[in-house]
Image (cartoon, grey):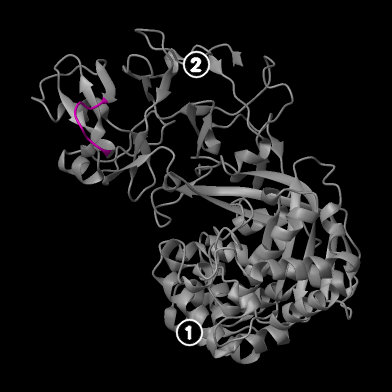
Amino acid sequence: MARNDKVIRTIRLSETVSPFGPGALVDILGESFMAMTGDEWPPASVRSAVSCDRLATKLRVDELWAAPSSGEPDAPKTPGLEFARFPAWLFCQECRRMTRWTRMMESGSTPKCPDCEGRLVPMRFVTVCATRSHADDVPWPDWVHRAGSGTCDRKDRLRFHPSKGAREGLSALQVSCDACKTTRSLGDLRGDVLVRDGFTCRGKQPWEREWGNCGKPLEVLQRGATSLYFGEVVSAIDIPEVEGREAELDEQIRKHPYWQAVQSGNAAILDMMVDELAAVLEPPADTIRRRILALTSDEPTLQDTKRSLLSEEFEAFAAAIAGSAPAQDFVTRVERRSERTPAGLGDVVLVDRLREVRATIGFRRYTPEAQLVPSVPKRPMERRWYPAVEGYGEGIFITFDSAAVDAWAVQDGVQRRAGRVESNQEGSMLGSRLHETSPQFLLLHAFAHAIMRELAFVSGYSAPSLRERIYCESTGDYGVFIYTTSTDVEGTLGGLARQGEADYLTGVVLRSLEQVAWCANDPVCSESDPQSIDGLNLAACHACLLAPETSCESFNLLLDRAMLVGGDGFDGYFQKAIESALDVSISAMS
């Protein structure tokens, strides 16, 4: 669809936060665009406010805004988000001519070759800044002419075509200049070659027209590479206001006589303050230290923010179990533990209606340690905000017997397996983006994935529509929340919450555990450790535990089904429950 000189495409409202938040590539019908940061969004008069004071406070912003949406995107006055065409260098599928496309060339239709009217498609490669998360086109004309005499200044006579002769990989492709006949193989399109040729980062994003002063080394990526975009998204369940343990801890920290000195950055006083608080308060010293650092930092880290949100949500679920009244967007009912409940599990909270708010705070490129680019750049004298979206749905919150979990976790075999993952996490570039490894977290995470696979069969929802939240933020707070949401204000249909009722949940849990007791890829899956990125999984593969990427906030890492079903020299947390269920099945068959 076209309106004036703009190409009109549509995406879902929820996709403007993830996976197509600011800085992400959107590939639509063979055309490639990049989402712009919030300072390029339409004015607040046409955006939709998203109310979630708890999330806004944790993110230290004033407001949350959703993108403008409409059921009639082609209507003349419908507001929308602008996207930058990226990469701007396109090539013709017919004659192979390369053209650098500009905004002035947009006509509301698919780009056509100026020579043969063939369709123009985006080049495969782009450059990114290795440290500051900038992105730009490959400087094709200058890069090609570096291989020649260097006297040709024509930038409109390039062609992208296969190389002559028997070659493989990128060396089988080349870019040539029709004017000076210079040719260069894509085998030379590497970061070290760009540095050698004198190319450095210009310090800009595709939608920015002014260059910065970066000068950092460039790396070459395919435009579909996962490392082109690492989005930072934080979500919160809209819960009734609960004065939980974290709020009490914050109050104790602020009342401490060393608080003013700690705010000034005195490390020695910080250690003394932590020791004194740990001696009189319940949370362990590392938890107190993290909380003090979060309260004194100018910008909270992503993990601190998530930890704080999850802690408050656990308190809300605990209050629901204790009998608190449901709220408008947090409608709950409790299924008490009974003799039919699998050993090791506790009470269950069925959430018939919930509201979730998801906000994108920024993105990184090339590595998760690169500099964060905020979703909305700070501007003096303006209110701070982040793009967000709200969804309504339902879910099942399952508590674990904390005493049983901690008693199980001290087994030597369990500690060894968890220690292996913890060691790998310390050396991983993704380690800082993941929850801290512990036997308890590996158990809860594996259980969440196992039960999500079963719920996808019986609840009426597809696997990608289910999500997990793992509650393992302090000793004894162990729970798993499986939920689904929709951007429709009416919410969902109740099929998921129904599976948490006593008549169904036991069967769901036991079937999910039976499915992971033996993997179709065993013994390879169970004996290949470590697995996945940087060895951050043990016994986990696509046949047993891995979930759709939209379902898991830990990138399908920190998983080990042996924590559920047992392994060499140690018992799984649910091993006895699985054996009992199998005995019953065998007896029934006989």
- Please name the residue shown 76% across and 58% down the image: 455
Residue 173 on image: x %, y %: 26, 30
Q: Is residue 576 above or below residue 41?
A: below
The local crowd at label 2, few if under 14, some if 14 to 19, many if 20 or more residues have their Cα within 10 Å, is some
The residue nearer to you, when weighing 458 against 40, is 458
Kind of residue at disc 2: Thr
Q: Tell me: 245 left or right of 270.
A: right
Residues drawn in magenta: 162-168
| Label 1: which secondary element | helix
- Numbered tag placed on residue 271 in the rendering: 1
Predominant SS of the magenta segment: loop
Q: Is residue 285 above or below residue 531?
A: below
- Numbered tag placed on residue 110 in the rendering: 2
Q: Quadrant of residue 385?
A: top right
Q: Is residue 324 visible?
A: no
Q: Tell me: 474 left or right of 508.
A: left
The residue nearer to you, when weighing 20 against 54, is 20
- Please name the residue shown 54% across and 84% down the image: 568
Residue 429 on image: x %, y %: 40, 62
Q: Quadrant of the C terminus?
A: bottom right
The residue nearer to you, when weighing 528 against 65, is 528
Q: Is residue 443 visible?
A: yes
